[in-house]
Structure formats: C-alpha cells, structure tokens
Amino acid sequence: MVAAELNVSLPTIWRWRKAGKFPDPVNLPGNPRWRRSTIEKLKGVPHEQ
C-alpha cells in the first residue's frame, strides 16, 4: 500500500530503507506498516497534528 501511494515498487521501498532514505516501519507480526503521518510527510502533504 505504501509503495502504491508513493508510486514506486515495493523493492524500491526496501532499497530506500536499507540505504537509510526511508523510515523503518511499525512492525506487526509479518506485516510492516507505516504511520499515515509518516507517509504524508514523505509525499509532502500537510497533515493535522
């Protein structure tokens, strides 16, 4: 889902993570997830605090 929102492939997300260019996910057993606020910051979308 995060890859689709950022219009990149999932391997790109994992490459960015490995290179330190993308934040680590909040890990749920077997399901890495990112906070909506984190994704909005990456997309440059203002969000409520």
Image: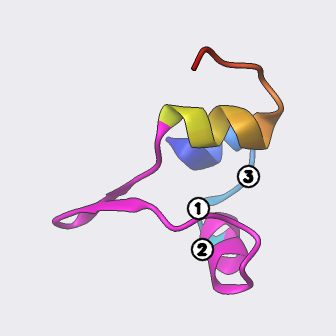
Q: Seen from this angle, which residue lies furthest front?
A: 49
Name which residue lies at 59% across and 61% down. 10
Q: Amino acid at mark 3?
A: Val
* Element on which disc 1 rests: helix
Query: Which numbered mark, 2 or 1, is in the foreground of this view?
Result: 2
Identify the mark at residue 14; answer none if there is no mark: 2
In the rendered image, residue 34, in percent from the top left (x then y), is placed at 47, 49
Which amino acid type is shown beneath numbered disc 2? Trp
Assess whether mark 3 and mark 1 are in contact (beta carbons under 8 angstroms).
no
Q: From which residue to which does the magenta span run?
A: 12-35
List x then y, in percent, for residue 28.
22, 59
Disc 2 and disc 1 in contact, CB within 8 angstroms: yes
Q: Say the numbered circle drawn on residue 2.
A: none
Q: CA distance from mark 2 to mark 1?
A: 6 Å
Is the residue 31 above or below the residue 19 in the image? above
Q: Residues within 10 Å of mark 1 (few under 14, many from 20)?
A: some
- Magenta residue check for 30: yes
Along the line of sight, which residue is nearer the eye, 27 or 5? 27
Colouring convention used in this rendered image of the protein: rainbow
Q: Nearer the viewer, mark 2 or mark 3?
A: 2
Residue at x 61% of width, y 64% of height? 23
> Which residue occupies the extreme right position in the image?
44
Say which residue appears at 61% left-offset and 49% top-offset: 3
Q: Is residue 18 magenta?
A: yes
**Mark 3 — residue?**
8
Position of 43 with respect to 24 (left or right) is right
Question: Secondary structure under badge 3?
Answer: loop
Does residue 18 lie above or below 38 as drawn? below
Between 32 and 37, the residue placed more toward the observer is: 37
Estimate the x, y position of residue 47 in percent, counting from the top left. Answer: 66, 18
Q: Which residue is mark 1?
A: 10
Q: Which image quarter: residue 48?
A: top right
